[in-house]
Amino acid sequence: MIAALLISLLMLLQIPSPAPQVRNDRETVIPSEATSVIPSEAKESQEDIDIAEIIFDHIGDDYEWHLWSWGDRHVALHLPVIVHSSTGWHVFSSKRLSHGQSYEGLRIDPEKGKIVEADSGKRPFDISITKNVLSLMMSSLLLLVIILCTARWYRKHDVLNEPPTGIAALMEPLVMMVHNMARENIGEEDYRKYSPYLCMAFLFILLNNFLGIVPFFPGGANLTGNIAITLVLALCTFFTVNLTGTKHYYKDIFNPDVPVFLKPIMPVIEVFSALMKPVSLTIRLFANMLAGHIMILCMVCIIFIMAKYGPLLMGSMTVVSVLFGIFLDALECLVAFIQAYVFTMLSSIYIGLARAHGE
């Protein structure tokens, strides 16, 4: 709700600004039209800042990874495009499609931000390495390196008499926290089988949440704010719960011990409840991380849209925006940990319910 209010306020305040030109690889930035507030000499040199485009360009996926800008020069990592269209397979650099260009009968739709066939506008089969895909690969590799380094330390040291150091000292409390969570929610008999999955889910979400806050490469990708990523994580929990559930768990769903007149109703309610669990996991993680990114971007954009009102107001709002931006960054770090914890805790509770045994 807060993020939506901030976007609405910024779009209402959206004005021409003497700030540097905003990068846009798909469309040319058009100078702003004359207004009664800005002198006509300044109007010609000013350009519109599309706040919605800046925000959604950051939180969305792309075929290139913008690294930095130096004056009018934009440095970006152009990622490989791999698509199968009506003319066959195409593999090339996304640089050939920048600035609205067409290549081999393909182009990027400026509205959807996806590759389409230039003639028909149909979307081909697309398995390109996009920004989110590359971020997913890098974060998975980084997580693998962290886990292997931690395991290497434990193999070479006496864990009973020597306290962990380095990366092991960071990982041990996190792993033990998830391990104890699994023991409490799943039970002594089964928790060891599910601890590896819960640790993986917690560390993966936590790492990508923190990388999304980092404003420079290899961070900055809105991975856990992408509903496709959170949906896959939620489906992993869903299948883990329902493929390993006990007979008592399925009996409570399809033949619960309730009065006869409730027998036809309760299975429908229980099945609906089981299907809504992954939905709640998906939306909770996706919405919280997405809202955090939007609020931080809104605070930054206030600096540029307040340039119209003179240096005094712009300077004061810059101070306010920076302070609020730092506060929101700190809050986002807390939210990053809480969301990883909540996802793992709910997953362990759902698994514990599915592993329940009859009295």
Image (cartoon, grey):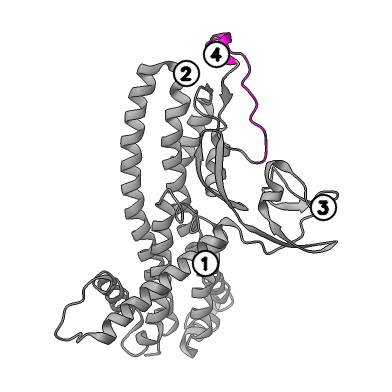
Q: Which residue is mark 4?
A: 42
Helix, strand or loop at disc 2? helix
Image coordinates for residue 21, horizontal then vertical, percent: 55, 30
Tag 3: residue type?
Gly
Q: Which numbered disc, 3 or 1, marks the residue that appears first in the sequence? A: 3
Circle 4: element type: helix
Q: Position of residue 351 (x, y in %)?
A: 43, 79
Which numbered disc covers residue 137? 1
If you read the primary sequence from the N terminus, does the residue marked by circle 3 or circle 4 appear first?
Answer: 4
3D distance between C-alphas at marks 3 and 4: 41 Å
Q: Which residues are magenta?
A: 26-43
Of the residues shown, which amino acid type is indicated by label 4?
A: Ala
Q: Residue at x 37, y 81 (%)?
A: 195
Distance Cα–Cα, label 3 vs label 1: 29 Å
Q: Nearer the viewer, residue 2 or 69?
A: 69
Please give the residue where the numbered disc 2 appears in the rendered image: 308
The image quadrant where one finds the C terminus is bottom left
| Quadrant of image for the N terminus | top left
